[in-house]
Structure formats: structure tokens, C-alpha cells
Amino acid sequence: MLLRRYPSVVNAAHQRWFGLAVLHKPTGTGRASLHLSVPARAPLTIAPLPDRRFVRVHGPESVTFLQGLLTNDMRHFEHCGAMYAMFLRANGRVFCDTLIYKRTHGEEAHDYLLECDASTAPRLEKHLKLYRLRKKVQIEAVDAAQFRLWVAFSDGVAEEEPLPTPRPECSEGGLQIFKDPRLPRLGFRVLVNSERQPENEAHLDRVFPGALKAETALPYTSFRYGLGVGEGEENLPDGKCFPLECNCDFLHGVSFHKGCYIGQELTARTYHTGVIRKRLMPLELDVAATPDQLPADAEIKNEEGASVGKLRGHAGTRALGLLRIEKVLQPGAQLTLNGIACRTGKPFWWPKDANARA
């Protein structure tokens, strides 16, 4: 569901949007309780994300350990339950993006799940262990059978439509539900314990009454491309892009006030000079294209035949491109992608002065 874009500072509004959607007030059965009231005029869609995995980081020094590796500030977890961030290489290029969830049901005070692509999880685990040294931190890939990840979102609604309001009316537990920390419009991430899968997925239907259930992740991917939001290895290839080009700053995934972290110098310098010429942007194709028609990194050209960007993913008639802002936002700009006509525009969630930083 769509909300006004929340501020990036840690204040009351930040806490409201970044907070856990699940209510931790115990019931008689000791389980968490949650119910979402969803307006009938804007039903949610619930879609599985089978190609996402988790890497668990826990231990007394988890916070300081991750603080030195992530673009974002771990101190946000004093006010929230989920956070978006990126891991960078030493040259400042993106290693991978991640959504981090703070676990609150276990015995450990510092226990985090790092969500990433299934193909990325092994190298992320290796990357973290490389920098662990003597820190009191445990790092392990979470078995795919332990959790199933779902997303609840709503496409085609007005920008100012309010988010569903949690109400403590369901006594069943087993789900961990987080508001997406990047954009309110991206809805909820739902972690389902696979040990009680049938019961928990039935509970999912009760938590989101009237929601449509998708069989695959494709509707969500298409929706995300329509917003111009990248996610995972396909959209943010390892070593081929910079965090600000991927809108990490607009998606509340980077802190410019924390201490040093790997890749921080180039990121901070780029931000403060204000020169960001390319960014991920949504593309609308005139016709749906197949993967054979649009290979990875296909060039996007203007009417003069000059290259103005590269493809970063597509689903049906929606796509995502790394585009030169100044070139593609010119009045009357006409773009083609391997002979297919397409259009782009400035996403509504970008700051109003975004063009000034191009």
C-alpha cells in the first residue's frame, strides 16, 4: 500500500515506518498476535519469494561487526525491526544488497537474519567469515527448509492510500511480519516458519484477509520494476554498479553520519560532490518481450542511436534500466531497447531535487 515517503532521520516517523509490523505482546498461548485491516478497495497480493535466502549473524559483537561492513547504521535497530543496506567492495562497487531483520523471539539479544538472493547467500557467508577474525560472532547460512519468504503488496493504488493498520485480534502466531524499510509502497515481508507450514500459511490468509495469492514471484517483480526498485543479483550485479546509482540513498539504505565501512570513501565523496549521472529507473515497454529478445545488459538507446543506459531486468512490459538521468528525462525523449520502443520517467518517490544531483 502506498504512503507518503517517510523521512530518513531516526525520529518518530522513522520508527513508525521502519518498525516491526508483528505485535510482540504475548497471548495466552505465548504466541505473537497480529491482524491487518485491509480496505476492500485496494486488496493486497501475497506472493512467494522462493529465490531468496537468509544468512544468520548472531553473537555479542554482531552489531559492531556488521557496522563496519554495511552501508547503513546498525543503531537504527534501537528503533526498528528491519533495515535495508548494501555490502560494498573495497573499490566502492556493490557486492550485494540485503534486507536485515532483527530476531526478537530467541534468547540472544543480538540476532539478525540477512536476506539476499539464493545465488548470493554462499558468497555472502564467505565474505562475512573473511572479516570475522576474532570477533565473538557466529555466521551461518539458514537452511532453505527453515523459512519461506512471502511479500504482501498492492499494485495500482493511489499514492496517499494508507497502509493497513495492525490490530491484536489474531491469537495464532508463527509469522514474522516486517514493513519493508525501503518504501512503504513495497508493503510487507513475511517470514513463515516451514516447520508448521500449512498452519502458518493458513494464518497468513487470516492476517491478510481478502488478499489475492500469487503462485510465483513474477507479479511482485513486475510491480517492483514499475516502481524502479532493484533487488538482488540480476538488478544489482556484483562489481558492476555503485550504491548511489542503485538508489541506495533514496531507499534509506546508506548512512552518511556513521563511521567507516568497506567502500565508504568513494560513496561519501560521490554523495557530497553531488555528481550522480546514472540511476536505476523504471521502463515501460510498448510490447512484452522474452528473455531471448532482451539479453542481460542490453543497450538502451535514444532517438539518435546513442546509448543512454543498460537493461538490468525485465518482466512482461515492465523493465529496469541503469540510465543517464540527464539524457532520458529530456522532454520528448524517445528510447528503444533492442528495437522495442520504451519510456521512462522520474519515480514519484525520488526527492524533488533529485535532478539537481544528476
Image (cartoon, rainbow, N blue to C red):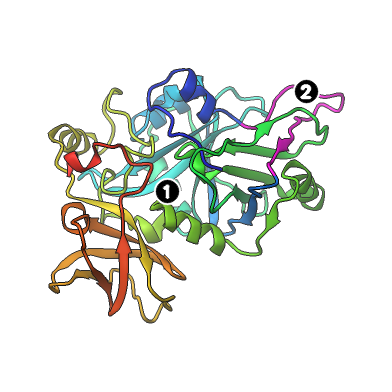
Residue at x-position 39% and y-position 38%? 85
Eyeballing the image, is 60 above or below 53?
Answer: above
Q: Is residue 322 left or right of residue 72?
A: left
Of residue 159 and residue 17, the one placed in the foreground of this image is: 159
Q: Is residue 45 left or right of residue 316?
A: right
Q: Position of residue 79 (x, y in %)?
A: 51, 21
Q: Amino acid at mark 1?
A: Leu
Q: Is residue 134 visible?
A: no
Q: Which mark is residue 281?
A: none
Q: Quadrant of residue 22?
A: top right
* Label 2, residues with CA under 10 Å away: few <14, some 14-19, many ≥20: few
Q: Is residue 19 magenta?
A: no
Q: In the rendered view of the protein, which quadrant contains the C terminus?
A: top left
Q: Is residue 60 left or right of residue 65?
A: right
Question: As drawn, which residue projects farthest toward the right?
Answer: 28
What residue would you read off at disc 2?
26
Eyeballing the image, is 132 above or below 212?
Answer: above
Q: Position of residue 244 (x, y in %)?
A: 26, 43
Eyeballing the image, is 293 above or below 115?
Answer: below
What residue would you read off at disc 1?
124
Residue at x-position 46% and y-position 40%? 183
Q: Quadrant of residue 304?
A: bottom left
Q: Is residue 108 left or right of residue 118?
A: right
Q: Which residues are magenta?
A: 21-39
